Image (tube, rainbow, N blue to C red):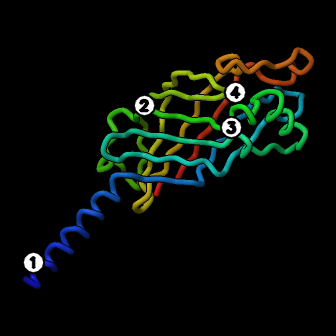
Amino acid sequence: MKNFYLLNIAFLFMISIGFSQERKITKSGTITFEASVPSFEEVKATNNSVSCILNTNTGELASLALVKGFRFKVALMEEHFNENYIESNKYPKATFKGTIKNFNLMSLSTDVPKTLVLNGILSIHGKTKEITTSVTLKKIKNDIELQSQFIVTPSDFDIHIPKVVSKKVAETVTIKIDFLLK
């Protein structure tokens, strides 16, 4: 009887270890966006507290960034971004939900990064846009480094840039993602 209990405890422990390996997460991922134009002040911001979860069985990925978490070099630019452009009080979150095609945890290497296709839906400012981009994955011990870059336009999300500053802001915005999923 005692052995039966020990076996059950060992079995439950092994199951919990197995389930914990199905997901890799971070709460300190980085997203940087840039819409700079040469000869004008840099339009660039970084958010270092982005959450992301990856289901290692299916390749499904979900990410959440609080819009007010983006930091600019110039405080006034950050204020205008939150109040006038992205309206962060009304739209406090940016989300991405998608799938990494042909994701296979066992095929990831610590030596060679692997590039796959990421498809999903990006939601910003109350609008959504389908995104297809490449994603680079690399195993670092038991963790996964995930990096990607893609381009969107403010008009994709009904973000209007006033004419008075339109020459100082690029028509396209480059978004870079860097996550270490544990």
Residue at 88% over, 14% down: 163
How far from the left and from the top, in percent, is residue 21? 33, 57
How far from the left and from the top, in percent, is residue 171? 74, 19
User: In this figure, which residue is indicated by the disc labeled 3?
Assistant: 92
Q: Secondary structure at mark 1?
A: helix
Q: Earlier in the sequence, mark 3 or mark 1?
A: 1
Q: Earlier in the sequence, mark 3 or mark 2?
A: 3
Q: Earlier in the sequence, mark 1 or mark 4?
A: 1
Q: Secondary structure at mark 3?
A: loop
User: In this figure, which residue is indicated by the disc labeled 2?
Assistant: 117
User: In this figure, which residue is indicated by the disc labeled 1?
Assistant: 4
Q: CA distance from mark 1 to mark 4?
A: 60 Å
Say whether residue 175 is left or right of residue 164: left
Q: Earlier in the sequence, mark 2 or mark 4?
A: 2
| Quadrant in which residue 143 is drawn | bottom left
Q: Could you tell me the amino acid type at mark 4?
A: Val
Question: Which-is-in-front pick, marks 2 and 1?
Answer: 1
Question: Which-is-in-front pick, marks 1 and 4?
Answer: 1
Q: Could you tell me the amino acid type at mark 1?
A: Phe
Q: Could you tell me the amino acid type at mark 3?
A: Pro
Which class describes the residues within 10 Å of circle 4: few (<14), some (14-19), or many (20+)? some
Say whether residue 148 is left or right of residue 105: right
Q: Earlier in the sequence, mark 2 or mark 1?
A: 1
Q: Could you tell me the amino acid type at mark 2?
A: Val
Say whether residue 58 is left or right of residue 80: left
User: In front here: 11 or 113?
Assistant: 11
Q: CA distance from mark 3 to mark 1?
A: 52 Å
Disc marking residue 173 = 4
Residue at 86% over, 17% down: 162
How far from the left and from the top, in percent, is residue 175? 64, 34
